[in-house]
Image (cartoon, helix red, strand yellow):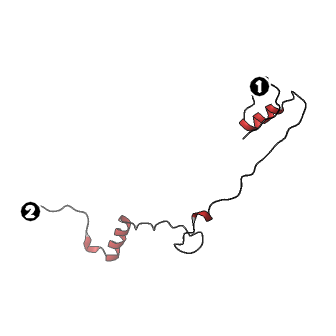
Amino acid sequence: MKQEDSMSDDVFESPEDKMAASAILNPPAPPPARTPSPTGYKDYKPPLHLFQNDEPEIAHKTILLGDSGVGKTSLLVQFNTGKYQTGNFSATVGIGFT
């Protein structure tokens, strides 16, 4: 006859001890994440067009006046591309950036 060599002795454990051990070994699942409704009403989903931003994009227009060869075009190219291009530019009569 083979005897079990276990150090566990359930004789002196109370039901509360068993429940506490079970809670430690099997913790409850966290509740699902919930985000509140933007309107405050449960399960109400407003139409998507209400969340779209219809504000027009602000257009910025710049006019530079000055003597020939002082760098007006170079300045505008730098603002538009973020790079300063060295070199000789031909005379610019009009320029447009988009």
Amino acid on which disc 1 is placed? Thr
- Residue at 70% in and 58% down: 55
Q: Residue 86 bears which disc, if any?
A: 1
- The answer to which image quadrant residue 2 occupies is bottom left
Query: Dot 1, crowdedness within 10 Å: few (<14), some or many (≥20)?
Result: few
In contact (CB < 8 Å): disc 2 and disc 1: no
Q: Residue furthest top?
A: 88
Q: Residue furthest right?
A: 67
Disc 2 to disc 1, how far (Cα)?
A: 97 Å
Q: Residue 37 bears which disc, if any?
A: none
x and y percent of residue 16 in the render? 35, 76
- Nearer mark to the viewer, of 2 and 1: 1
Judging from the image, what secondary structure is the residue with disc 2 in? loop
x and y percent of residue 60 in the render? 78, 47
Q: Which residue is mark 2?
A: 1
Q: Is residue 74 left or right of residue 11?
A: right
Q: Residue furthest left?
A: 1
- Residue at 51% in and 72% down: 43
- The answer to which image quadrant residue 95 occupies is top right
- Residue at 22% in and 62% down: 6
Amino acid on which disc 2 is placed? Met
Residue 28 drawn above or below residue 97:
below
- Residue at 75% in and 30% down: 84
x and y percent of residue 33 in the render? 49, 65
Query: Dot 2, crowdedness within 10 Å: few (<14), some or many (≥20)?
Result: few
The front one of 62 and 94 is: 94
Image quadrant containing the N terminus: bottom left
Q: Is residue 30 left or right of residue 90?
A: left
x and y percent of residue 15 in the render? 31, 76
Please tell me which of labels 2 and 1 falls first in the chain.
2
Judging from the image, what secondary structure is the residue with disc 1 in? loop
Q: Is residue 93 left or right of residue 58?
A: right
